[in-house]
Structure formats: C-alpha cells, structure tokens
C-alpha cells in the first residue's frame, strides 16, 4: 500500500466495503476494539456461519488497507461518535484507539484556533447525511497543532440506512507552513534584488559538470549539493524547450551574448514547473570557460498570470453581455476598453474608440462630426464643458441628447486609482413616455379648467334665477320648494366646479411653493379665529391648547392654512351641536410635528379611512349630499405631500365619545428644512 495514497483514492478503496461491513458486521465483530465476537450458530445454520466468515475476511482485508496507509482513518456511528480508528490516526493525534472510542472527533481534536465556519459546514453536511471535503486545524494530545486535508463520507447499508461516517485525513501542516514560508520568502526577495526568488547555477565548459545552489536543487527536487551533467539537466526539458536551450547556448558561446527566457521542465520527481532562466558567460584568457546563470520557479506566477488572463476574458465577456453601454478610461483619460453597445450608441465616432485614444480626442472629433446635438455650432465650448464634468465625475447622472434624437443618461465615476468608469443608458423611450404623460396631464388640467369655467357662467345664471324665484315665492308659497331645490342643486354644482378648478390650480402651482419658517400652531390659531363666528352659529366650540406649543415648520403658509381650513370645515359640518372640536399638537419620533383635529361627529368607517382622500370619494355616512364635492381632502393630501408631509384619518375610541381625527404631519424645521421654492420632486438633470 502506497503510504502517500491520496484521500480520494483511499476513500474509494474503503467506502464501499466499510459501508456494508459496518452495518452487517454488528453481530460479528466490533470495529472499535478490532476483536472478533464469537457467536454459536444454530443447527443447520451453516450459511450464516459462511456469511460471518466472509464478513470477517472482508474486515481483515479492509483493516490491512487502512493500517498500511499513512493517512488517518476514523469511523463513527450515526451520532458521530468514534467506533474505530487506524494506526495512522494514533500516530497523528497521539491518542490510542481505546481512548477515543465513544468520543466526538470534533470535541476531542478541535481547539480555539479551529475555524468556526469550517466546523459549522462539517456539522451541516453530516447532519443532512452528506459528504464533506475540506481542510481544518486540529490539536494533538501533546498540544501540537496541525492542518488536515479531510474527506468524510456517509456509510449506508443495503437499504440506504445511515450507519455511520468514515473520515480519511492527511497531515498537510508542512504544505500549509511551506505556503506561508514561500510567501514570506517571496516578499523578502522582492525587496532584496534585481533577480527575485532566484537559485544559482553554473556550467563548467571543461568538465561538463553543472553545479546548483541549494535553492536551485529545491526547485528541481534534488538533494542540496547535488551535481549533474548538462545532458541530465537538458533531459528535464521537453523536446522544443531542449532544442531552444541548446540553440541559445551555442549562440551565446559564438556571439558572446547573455540570454533570458522562460521554460517548462519536469523535475526529477516528475513535477512540471515553469522556470525563469537567465545567464551570462565567464571568460579567461583562453576564451569562454563557464556559463553562470540564475533560475527561478515561476510556476505560481504563470498560474497567476493565466488566472488574471482568464479573469480578464471573463470580465470582457461580462461587459460585452450587459445590456448597457460601458466604457473605461485610465488615469490619463486614455481608453482602456468599451463594449459594442458603447460603439453602437456613438456610431459616428466608433472608429475612434481604440485602446489608448484619449477621451478628449474622441468627443472632440465626434462633436465635429455632429455626434452631439448640444455641440452643434459650439464645439470648443461644448468640449470644455464636457471635459470639466468628466474630470469631476462623481456618479451623479447627467443627460445627453444625440444628433439622431436619442436621449442618453450618463453615469461616470472616478475610481480611487484614477480610472474613470462610465455607463450610458438609452432612456429615449422613457423620456418620450414622460413627455407624453406630462402632455396628457397638462391637457387634463386644461380640460378641467376649461370645462369648469364654461360651467360657471350658466351656473351663475341658474343661481341668479333661483334667487329671484325664491323672492317671488315669498308671495306665492306653492313655488317655494321648487326654487329652493333649484338653488340648492346650483350651489352643489358650483361647489363641485370650484373644487375642480382648485385641483387644476393646485397641480400647476405646487411646484412653486413660497416656503418660509412658520409656527404650525399659530397658523392653525389664525384659521380658528376665522371660523369662530361660524362655529358659534352652529353651537360648536373650537378649542386650542393653552398655552400654544411652538411647532416650527417650513411651509407655504397660504397652502397649509388651506388644508387646516378644509379639515376644520368638515368637522364643523358634521359635529353635533353643543360639542367641541379640538386642535392639539405633539412631537413625533424626533423628526416631525403632528397637528390633530378631533370632532365628536359620526366618524368614518374603518374601510373608508383612505378612500376619503380619493377624488370625488365621500364617506358612506355623508352621501346624503352633506359631504361636499369630495375634492377637498384630495387637495389637502396633494398639498401635504408637496411639503414632504402627510395627512391621514382615524376614529376616536367609543369610550371617548367617538368622532373622527385628522392627523397632519410635517418635518420639523430644524430636522429637515425646506428651501424656498423646493418640493419633494426628483432633481432636474442638465441636458448636454
């Protein structure tokens, strides 16, 4: 048995046999103690005896396999407690087999330095009956810490029932330590001289002997101090590489030149490695006497180079696959790469997009060819402006209109190392759709305004005629109800028309709010003063807190008082005579003020608390015509949203007398001040 047998090969040799053996042999022998357990067969049970003898023979064969390997082998029961280990395990851990039976391998061997993530992965895999392959740090009985390459396989009987687990472990401490030492050595050699990671060699032309330094011997898997002939050294090279070296040596001797090359060779142990070889010739009076050179194992560097090249190809493929235009410029603003989408987007200047071309030359020539609409007739000025934005790229999107009518969103970001990465997104359809929607919205508002104005004229005539009719009815009582009905219907229609006009005006003016710092409770108190007479006529009280709390907000006072006035008017309309309408203010979550208006009216059905803010919607409790046009609360919500605030309704608890509550919430001036003329709308981007 090869003592260096790999985990995978050993698992293949043991897994099948031990899986059945561990299950079937339960009544025949104990794996943990490696001692047969005798049992007496009943009369006529010769087949069972033969079967047991076969199991014992299979056990012995697998035991020989497991014992002869230098790998550690561990078998556990389904609860992951040890039932058997081999001699390799004992040598590796320092524990005898009798000491570890019945124990958990993890609790026995893991230490505080063991990677918790790896431990969790092992537990998850075994808990689900799956295999595990990986590396882990353990600690021996003597406290020595060592690294293992470990492979764990579940063991199942013929019915597929899990009977345990088998782990095969290889000590890879030396490999891990070597990797760390190699990294340290590489760092030192990088600082040390012109030839990093180097081993020396020399070829004596007279004797034909080749001498290696210890480092070169290690590179070639030779014992330090070993000497070989040139033919033996050349034999390590494959055919093409050997011919290349022979030609270089001959050429160097003839022309007195030095050489430098990279070669692939096979070490004396059969390892294929890449080396960097450099050499020069030593001369005496008689001519060349010796070739002296340096040799460096660059296998890792070649692998890294191949990995970098592979990653570069993957990155390029990914960039070409994305659905947006992509471009990358180096710190000197020279083109590194761009994808086909970028070339297609700027078709008039696509021939200029070659690696090394400067950003300025690409856009300047493109502007001269009419690539950019904003550059027509002003190329130099436009290029200067574009270069300033490009050099200050900070990820803020800008808009660019091309000569073919397409609209492009540009996103550029300067990276810490000076590179500039950019995306170009064709938003032509989005812009066209937005323009169409805005046009439709303007048309709607204009239509509403026109219809409303057209309706106001006949409504004024109706109201005037009905007022005359009501006076006429003072002496002709039989006409009184008819004219009263006409007048009431006209008033309702006029209220609706005025509401439509107000919505139209609101949509057109909320983008230009006159925002200033105000005390929200003072604004409410002014509205209360205006409506005090109306409240008295309806035998209602408007109550404010005493003293008034200060609630600083930044709002358009006229628009905010319009909201408060509308909410109070609703409360005055529905509150029973003899009750109070209260206004109160409070501080919310360290960021907002809330003004609450509470009445003792009929309240609002729970499923209509949001519906009442929709255009023309009214509560089912006010659909007798007393609820107005159904547009007031819609306008209120628009105004509140334009101030980055909100309005919502709720019902007061029955034990408090019932009624509805309207909550107006606004950002506190100190926490989120609004500047004059600003609203909660997305920024307008400059078109270039």
Image (cartoon, helix red, strand yellow):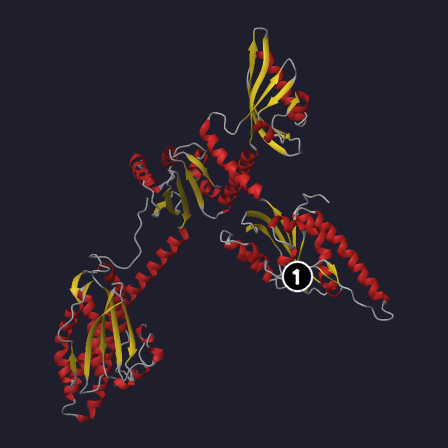
Taking 340 as reference, is 270 left or right? right
Residue under label 1: 164
Residue 657 placement (x, y as % from top left): 25, 86
Quadrant location of the N terminus?
top right
The quadrant where residue 438 appears = bottom left
Q: Nearer the viewer, residue 134 or 577?
A: 134
The quadrant where residue 235 appears = top right
- Vertical relation: 537 (above or below) 437: below
Taking 253 as reference, is 42 left or right? right
Q: Nearer the viewer, residue 124 or 537?
A: 124
- Vertical relation: 287 (above or below) 529: above
Taking 115 as reference, is 432 left or right? left
What residue is shown at x 63% (from left), y 22% (from top)?
244
Quadrant location of the C terminus?
top left
Label 1 Cα neighbours within 10 Å, binned few <14 / some 14-19 / many ≥20:
many
Does the rendering let one see residue 555?
A: no
Residue 192 placement (x, y as % from top left): 46, 28
Residue 605 placement (x, y as % from top left): 33, 81
Q: Circle 1 sits in a helix, a strand or a loop, which is it?
A: strand
Q: Nearer the viewer, residue 622 or 605?
A: 605
What residue is shown at x 17% (from left), y 72% (from top)?
524
- Vertical relation: 380 (above or below) 651: above
Total numbered labels placed on residues in the image: 1
The quadrant where residue 421 appears = top left
Does the rendering let one see residue 23?
A: yes
Farthest residue in the right direction? 44
What residue is shown at x 28% (from left), y 65% (from top)?
641
Residue 508 placement (x, y as % from top left): 25, 62
Q: Nearer the viewer, residue 115 or 113?
A: 113
Taking 306 as reference, is 664 left or right? left
- Vertical relation: 429 (above or below) 502: above
């Amino acid at each position: 048995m090869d003592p260096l047998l790999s985990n995978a090969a050993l698992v293949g040799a043991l897994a099948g046999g031990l899986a059945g053996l561990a299950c079937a042999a339960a009544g025949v022998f104990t794996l943990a103690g490696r001692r047969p357990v005798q049992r007496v067969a009943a009369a006529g049970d010769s087949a069972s005896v033969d079967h047991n003898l076969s199991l014992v023979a299979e056990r012995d064969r697998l035991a020989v396999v497991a014992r002869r390997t230098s790998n550690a082998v561990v078998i556990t029961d389904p609860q992951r407690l040890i039932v058997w280990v081999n001699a390799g395990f004992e040598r590796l851990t320092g524990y005898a087999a009798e000491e570890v039976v019945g124990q958990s391998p993890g609790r026995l061997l893991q230490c505080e330095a063991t990677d918790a993530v790896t431990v969790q992965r092992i537990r998850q895999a075994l808990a689900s009956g799956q295999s595990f392959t990986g590396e882990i740090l353990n600690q021996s009985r003597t406290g020595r810490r060592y690294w293992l390459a470990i492979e764990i396989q579940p063991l199942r009987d013929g019915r597929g029932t899990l009977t345990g687990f088998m782990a095969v472990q290889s000590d890879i401490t030396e490999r891990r330590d070597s990797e760390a030492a190699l990294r340290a050595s590489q760092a030192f050699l990088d600082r040390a001289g012109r030839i990093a990671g180097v081993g020396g060699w020399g070829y004596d032309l007279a004797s034909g002997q080749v001498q290696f330094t210890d480092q070169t011997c290690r590179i070639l898997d030779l014992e330090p101090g070993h000497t070989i002939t040139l033919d033996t050294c050349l034999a390590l090279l494959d055919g093409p590489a050997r011919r290349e070296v022979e030609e270089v040596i001959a050429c160097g001797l003839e022309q007195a030149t030095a050489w430098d090359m990279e070669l692939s060779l096979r070490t004396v142990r059969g390892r294929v490695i890449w080396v960097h070889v450099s050499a020069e010739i030593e001369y005496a009076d008689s001519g060349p006497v010796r070739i002296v050179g340096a040799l460096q194992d660059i296998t890792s560097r070649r692998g890294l180079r191949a990995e970098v090249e592979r990653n570069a190809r993957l990155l390029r493929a990914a960039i070409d696959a994305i659905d947006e235009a992509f471009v990358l410029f180096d710190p000197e603003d020279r083109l590194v790469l761009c994808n086909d989408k970028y070339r297609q987007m700027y078709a008039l200047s696509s021939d200029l997009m070659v690696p090394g071309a400067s950003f300025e030359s690409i856009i300047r020539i493109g502007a001269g060819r009419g690539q950019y609409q904003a550059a027509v007739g002003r190329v130099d000025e436009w290029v200067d402006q574009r270069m300033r934005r490009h050099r200050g790229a900070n990820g803020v999107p800008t808009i660019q209109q091309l000569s073919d009518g397409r609209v492009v969103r540009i996103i550029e970001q300067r990276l810490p190392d000076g590179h500039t990465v950019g995306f170009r997104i064709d938003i032509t359809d989005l812009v066209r759709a937005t323009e169409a929607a805005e046009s439709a919205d303007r048309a709607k508002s204009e239509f509403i305004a026109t219809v409303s104005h057209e309706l106001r004229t006949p409504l004024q005539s109706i109201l005037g005629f009905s007022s005359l009719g009501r006076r006429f009815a003072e002496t002709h009582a039989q006409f009184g109800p008819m004219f009263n009905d006409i007048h009431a219907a006209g008033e309702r229609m006029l209220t609706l028309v005025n509401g439509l006009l107000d919505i139209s005006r609101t949509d057109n003016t909320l983008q230009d709010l006159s925002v200033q710092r105000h005390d929200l409770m003072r604004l409410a108190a002014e509205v209360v003063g205006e409506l005090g007479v109306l409240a008295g006529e309806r035998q209602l009280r408007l109550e404010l807190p005493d003293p008034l709390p200060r609630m600083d907000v930044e709002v358009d006072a006229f628009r905010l008082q319009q909201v408060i006035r509308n909410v109070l008017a609703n409360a005055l309309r529905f509150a029973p005579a003899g009750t109070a309408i209260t206004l109160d203010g409070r501080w919310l979550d360290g960021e907002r003020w809330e003004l609450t208006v509470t009445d003792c009216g009929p309240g609002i059905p729970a499923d209509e608390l949001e519906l009442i803010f929709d255009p023309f919607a009214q509560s089912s409790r006010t659909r007798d015509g007393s609820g107005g046009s159904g547009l007031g609360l819609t306008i209120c919500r628009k105004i509140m949203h334009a101030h980055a605030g909100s309005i919502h309704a709720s019902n007061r608890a029955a034990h408090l007398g019932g009624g509805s509550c309207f909550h107006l919430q606004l950002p506190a001036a100190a926490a989120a001040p609004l500047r004059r003329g600003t609203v909660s709308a997305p920024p307008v981007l400059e078109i270039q």
